[in-house]
Every structure is written in C-alpha cells, then in structure tokens.
Image: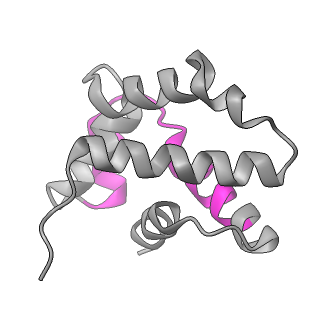
Amino acid sequence: MGSAPTPGGVITRGLAEMMRLGVKLGAARETFMGLAGLGDLVLTCTDDQSRNRRFGMALGRGQSLRDAASGIHQWSKGLPAARAVYDVAQRLTVDMPICQEVYRVSTG
C-alpha cells in the first residue's frame, strides 16, 4: 500500500494535468507557469479563503456534497468545473487521473 500524496505532489501532478489538457486545446505550455495557471492552482490548494479548498476539505471530512456546499456559505465553482473538465478530457483522450477521481467523488 502506497503512502498518501503530499500537497506539493498533488499540486505538481495537477499542474501537469492542466498543461496536458491545455496543450491539447491549443494553449502554450508556458501559459500555465504564470499567475493564471500555477499561481491560481497554488492559491486554490493552499489558502483557506478559497471556496474550492474549503469545499474539498469538507468532502475530505466525510460531508456529503450538499452539506459541503451549504457549509461554505458561498458558491464553489469547482464542482461544475470538475465535471466539465472531465467531459472534455474524456472526449479528447487526455490522461487526467486527479480530475477523474474528483469527478468520481463529485458524482457519488
């Protein structure tokens, strides 16, 4: 049995997934190294003010999707975005295992 992934590892692998999909859609890899790519990813993953982070942490504590969404008292765009990204990745056959697991969790 493997060890749990580190936050840095998940961020690094998440960035790689974002880049694979973006490049497949025609973006330049360098775009993802700026504030709109890596900067936003790191902030979302580490800042407790992030609605998506708070939502994910609530799910990690075992809350239902409904309870997690209502518990943060704000709209979290992460759930519909995860589903949309999953659909695009599947259509374009882009390997995105983190996205796939987020989608799996978000669909019950």
In the image, residue 85 lies in the stretch drawn in magenta: yes
Foreground: 41 or 12? 12
Left or right of residue 56: residue 33: right
**Residue at 57%, 16% in the rendered image:** 35
Residue 83 quadrant: bottom right
Residue 26 quadrant: top right
Left or right of residue 30: residue 38: left
Left or right of residue 78: residue 90: right
Q: Which residues are magenta?
A: 64-87
Residue 53 quadrant: top left
Q: Position of residue 91 (x, y in %)?
A: 80, 72
In the image, residue 72 lies in the stretch drawn in magenta: yes
Q: Where does the C terminus fall, quadrant-wise?
A: bottom left
Marker count (numbered): 0
Q: Position of residue 86 (x, y in %)?
A: 63, 64
55 shown above or below 106:
above
**Residue at 71%, 53% in the rendered image:** 21
Foreground: 10 or 69? 10
Q: Position of residue 47 (x, y in %)?
A: 29, 22
**Residue at 11%, 83% in the rendered image:** 1
View extreme (right): residue: 26
Q: Magenta stretch mostly in which secondary structure?
A: helix
Foreground: 92 or 12? 12
